[in-house]
Image (cartoon, rainbow, N blue to C red):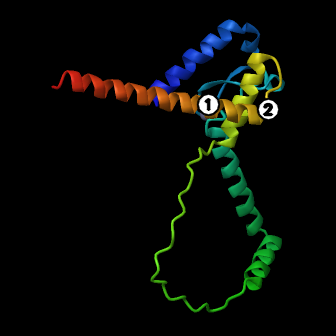
Amino acid sequence: MAALVLEYYVLLRSVLHAKPHLRACLTRCRHCRIFFLTHPRNAGRHNLRCPFGCREAHRKQASAQRSAAYYREPKGKGKKRDFNQRRPRQYCVPKPPSDRPRARRPRRRRTQWNLLMVEHVRMVVSLIEGRRISRGQVLRMLAKNLRQHTMCRRRKIDQAVAWLNEQPP
Ligand SMILES: [Zn+2]
């Protein structure tokens, strides 16, 4: 994790070196203190949370608190009672387990990107390039990078195997 953050900071520094005007967009997470680039409309704000998890965690927490507060109110309590009564309480006969093994469809592995991160990458790339980048473009870029990364790793493993074949320990 530390290595990843270091790599990120090296990259961030080189970006700010190449595009000094983006320094205005540099801010720090109020929760975990990591530096990140924010949208120009938020430039100068220092009460933001980072898109690497803190923002999402805070949003979830706030929403849980809101709904807890709502159900504590008498109006909310009534709603919850209605809701629970509307829910059908039927006894469902459990189905006997089928003895035929369920056919497993081979699933194509698809990378699930965190959409909040994708949006952050999209915003930062747009800032760096000075033009609007679409989410589709970011997803294609990420897929390409991942492929190259995998190929690179595979090549390294192949090299190591070849080397071991030549010079067995
Ligand atoms: Zn944070």
Mark 2 packing: few (<14 Cα in 10 Å), some, or many (20+)? few
Residue 47 in the image: x percent, y percent?
72, 30
Residue drawn 74% across and 17% down? 128
**In the structure shown, which secondary structural element does the residue marked by tag 1 occupy?**
helix
The answer to whether residue 38 is above or below residue 110 is: above
Which residue is under mark 1? 144
- Mark 2 — residue? 134
Q: CA distance from mark 2 to mark 1?
A: 16 Å
User: Is residue 66 visible to the viewer in this orientation of the structure?
Assistant: yes
- Estimate the x, y position of residue 4 in percent, counting from the top left: 49, 27
Q: Residue at x 55, y 15 (%)?
A: 10
Looking at the image, which is closer to me, 40 or 106?
Answer: 106
Residue at 76% x, 75% y is 80
Nearest to the observer: residue 41 or residue 11: 11
SS at badge 2: loop
Residue 169, image x and y in percent?
Answer: 15, 25
- Residue 158 vs 86, above or below: the answer is above
Residue at disc 1, CB closer than 8 Å to ligand 1 = no
Q: Splitting the image into 4 quarters, where does residue 56 fall? A: top right
For badge 1, the amino acid type reads Lys
Q: In this image, 25 relative to 52: left or right?
A: right
| Label 1 environment density (alpha carbons within 10 Å; few <14, some 14–19, many ≥20) | few
Amino acid type indicated by mark 2: Ser
